[in-house]
Amino acid sequence: MPTEVVVALIAFLGTAVGSWSGIRAANKLVDFRLQKLEEKVAKHNQVVERTYRLEEQMKAANHRISDLEDKEDHDEHD
């Protein structure tokens, strides 16, 4: 085999391995960042769910307070 062909094959192999290694490293970084983002989204969703439950509890408490105030007003007029 001519020397030029051997050199070209070695250069091609080096380029291919370098590109493949770079792609793998980038994929690992993307996977890591995606995992961290998923964790943050999960925490955010928990906060949203807790806020919704608290709003429902506040709504019920305000309704009970209104009922008690209405009952008190009604009792005062009798």
Image (cartoon, rainbow, N blue to C red):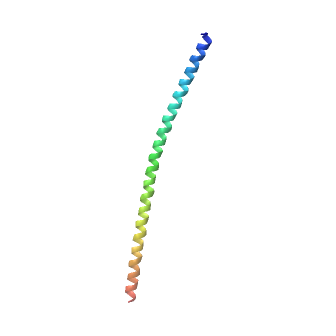
Q: Tell me residue 72's x, y (percent).
A: 38, 82
Q: Nearer the viewer, residue 74 or 6?
A: 6
Q: Nearer the viewer, residue 52 or 10?
A: 10
Q: Residue furthest bottom?
A: 78
Q: Residue at x 40, y 79 (%)?
A: 69
Q: Is residue 55 above or below residue 44?
A: below
Q: Residue at x 39, y 74 (%)?
A: 64
In screen coordinates, is 13 left or right of 71?
right
Q: Is residue 57 above or below residue 74?
A: above
Q: Is residue 2 above or below residue 65?
A: above
State how many labels appear: 0
Q: Residue at x 44, y 46 (%)?
A: 39
Looking at the rendered image, the quarter that the N terminus falls into is top right
Q: Residue furthest front?
A: 1
Looking at the rendered image, the quarter that the C terminus falls into is bottom left
Q: Tell me residue 48's x, y (percent).
A: 45, 57
Q: Quadrant of residue 63?
A: bottom left
Q: Tell me residue 53's x, y (percent).
A: 41, 62
Q: Residue at x 43, y 58 (%)?
A: 49
Q: Quadrant of residue 68?
A: bottom left
Q: Tell me residue 66's x, y (percent).
A: 42, 76
